[in-house]
Amino acid sequence: MGKRILAVLLSAILALGCCTTAFAADFTAEAQDLQSAGLFNGTDKGFELDREATRVEAAVMLVRLLGKEAEAKAQFDAGTIVNPFTDVPVWANAYVAWLYSQSLTKGISQTQFGTGKCSGQMFATFALRALGYTEAAGDFTYATALDTAADLGLYDALTMAGTFCRDELVAMADQTLATTVKGGAQSLLEKLVADGAVDAAAAKALLEKQAALRSYNAACMALGDMNAMAMTMKMKMDVSTENVTVVTTVSDMTASVITDPTDLTKLQMAISGKMTMGGETTDYQEWVKDGWMYMNMGASKVKAKMGLDALQDALDSATVSADSMPIYYVDAITKTTSGSNTVYTMTCKDSYSDLISSMIGDLDETLGVDAVKLGKMTIATTFDAKGALKAERIQITMSATTTQDGETFQLDYIDDIDMQITATGSAVKVTYPDFSDYVEGPLEDIA
């Protein structure tokens, strides 16, 4: 709950005039990680991550995830296994032959393997088998493979739904390798290295990444029973075009939130601060109390009743829970110490959370921003010696195109957000002013 509260506070603060923008993830860094470990190869055209994955490619990946690539090639070359299908490309014969010999795959007929497209459901089935889960043991069925994969963190419908490309195959494979095998204590990659199926030196960087992320996730999970947080935050956002700054927005604020996991209507929140844009400074205050939202923007004082859906949306404001960060959202992560503090620094995907789309914001309703592309997103999270969350700094660069009077040009965004946690748990207090002069209005007018 601790990191979730942080997301609630941040989302509420950034919701002042923001819009929603869709993003597509790019798992090139993860493909490079897998390639370095000898577990993924490109084609003569490169990684081809934007191309739909095929059944044959999924079969090859399964053999590698099972650590049986060398065995499959040796047995096929020795003639002890054969590929009964006539439509498999020569380079994949050994892989399909081995899977068929182990009753791990079937063809679409006695002579045709089926070289068409691979679905997410199909690869989820393969990934579960690689981790030791089987249909025979009642762990899952083909029909429930995606649900089981989602429960284990292998599959995210928000990121991977729709066309299943090699990009998504890489992401699922990366997470599968970082997941603990059924009934064991090792990640799949650790097991493959221990079994000698993957070279330890080649896998070193990926193993270190897994270990750092595991430590980060454990630190976040330790915050799970914290239902209150207060912080200060400074945010600076520069928007420029052709190296000329168009507008700079600076916000200084304090915020606090108290939640009751058993009753949404008991959500308490207070945010106050100053926002300077284009040389003009605006004071603002926002509160949530007893299911009502109140906002004071200086010139107006508005209140609106929040339904359960709106309250739930506030608590679920982060698209992806930071409590269990999947490895495919993290291009790189390091764990360092600063005095008695531990600092995790991550370079993350654009799909990490709604934070990035919030950053785009409705700076000008006529701007017409589209085609947003993330440049880099770095998150540095600091925990003290007792495991308490102390600070988080988020730095983002991104660009977008916009069309004005028939001319298309690029906007570049640089965001720097520095949050310091000032209190947690019972030390957090939310105070309210007199709301008697606030005028009721539609929620969308103030949310």
Image (cartoon, rainbow, N blue to C red):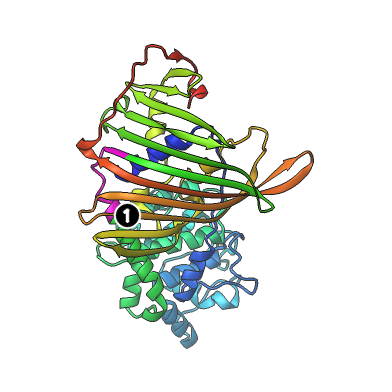
Q: Name the element at disc 1.
A: strand
Q: Quadrant of residue 405?
A: top right
Q: Which residue is farthest right? A: 406
- Provide the residue designation for mark 1: 382
The image shows residue 76, relative to residue 299, as above or below, that is below
Q: Which residue is farthest bottom? A: 78
Q: State yes or no: residue 228 in magenta.
A: yes
Q: Quadrant of residue 366?
A: top right
Disc 1: CA contacts within 10 A as few (<14), some (14-19) or many (>=20): many
The image shows residue 436, relative to residue 58, as above or below, that is above
Q: Position of residue 81 (x, y in %)?
A: 46, 80
Q: Quadrant of the N terminus?
A: top left
Which residue is drawn at the image coordinates 57% and 77% (left, top)? 91
Please tell me which residue lies in front, 316 or 193. Answer: 316
Part of the protein shown in magenta: 219-230
Q: Amino acid at mark 1?
A: Thr
Which residue is drawn at the image coordinates 37% and 12% (left, top)? 436
Q: Position of residue 227 (x, y in %)?
A: 26, 37
Q: Is residue 140 left or right of residue 156?
A: left
Q: Position of residue 45 (x, y in %)?
A: 65, 71
Q: Quadrant of residue 434?
A: top left
Which residue is drawn at the image coordinates 38% and 38% (left, top)? 8
Which residue is drawn at the image coordinates 40% and 31% (left, top)? 272
